[in-house]
Image (cartoon, grey):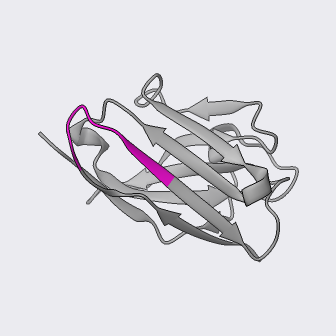
Amino acid sequence: QVQLVESGGGLVQAGGSLRLSCAASGRTTSNYPMGWFRQAPGEERKFVAAINWSGASTDYADSVKGRFTISRANAKNAVYLQMNSLKPEDSAFYYCAAGYSGTDYVRGRGFVYWGQGTQVTVSK
């Protein structure tokens, strides 16, 4: 079993930056695809970004491409989301997620492990 804990959320003005972190425990996630999703009030959870096990390949939602960067540190069992040029519409609860070892990372399809989330609020 894998436990994921997010941190780094908060309140920021439009145009600002935040860096989310996700710490994994329970077992090593160095072979697992990992990613980030977000959910705004009244909306369904949506894919944000994903990264393959080695960090060599990434996938982004069109809405964040060019502004967000996903990365991972396998030695630390961690994944990160650097968010720049934030917009009010980026406000949401952000969730870290992971898939089984060997599964695809694209669009975070089939991810099975989820964190509790961290709130990101971007003011105008």
Side of 40 where 23 appears, left or right: right
Between 42 and 22, the residue placed more toward the observer is 22
Residue lying farthest left? 124
Q: In which quarter of the image is residue 15?
A: top left
**Range of residues picked out in magenta:** 12-20
Q: Position of residue 121 (x, y in %)?
A: 24, 53
Q: Residue at x 31, y 42 (%)?
A: 90
Q: Does the magenta segment cover residue 35?
A: no
Side of 115 where 55 appears, left or right: right
Report the quarter where the N terminus lies.
bottom right
How many labels sit on residues? 0
Q: Position of residue 57 (x, y in %)?
A: 74, 30
Q: Where is residue 34 in the image (x, y as percent from the top left)?
A: 68, 51
Vertical arrangement, residue 103 with respect to residue 87, above or below: below
Side of 28 where 77 appears, left or right: left
Q: In which quarter of the image is residue 17?
A: top left
Q: Residue at x 40, y 30 (%)?
A: 63
Residue lying farthest front? 75
Between 41 and 19, the residue placed more toward the observer is 19
Q: Which residue is drawn at 62% across and 32% down?
A: 59
Report the quarter where the C terminus lies.
top left
Q: Where is residue 22 in the image (x, y as percent from the top left)?
A: 57, 60
Q: Residue at x 37, y 33 (%)?
A: 84
Vertical arrangement, residue 102 with respect to residue 5, above or below: above
Vertical arrangement, residue 93 with respect to residue 73, above or below: below
Q: In which quarter of the image is residue 78?
A: bottom right
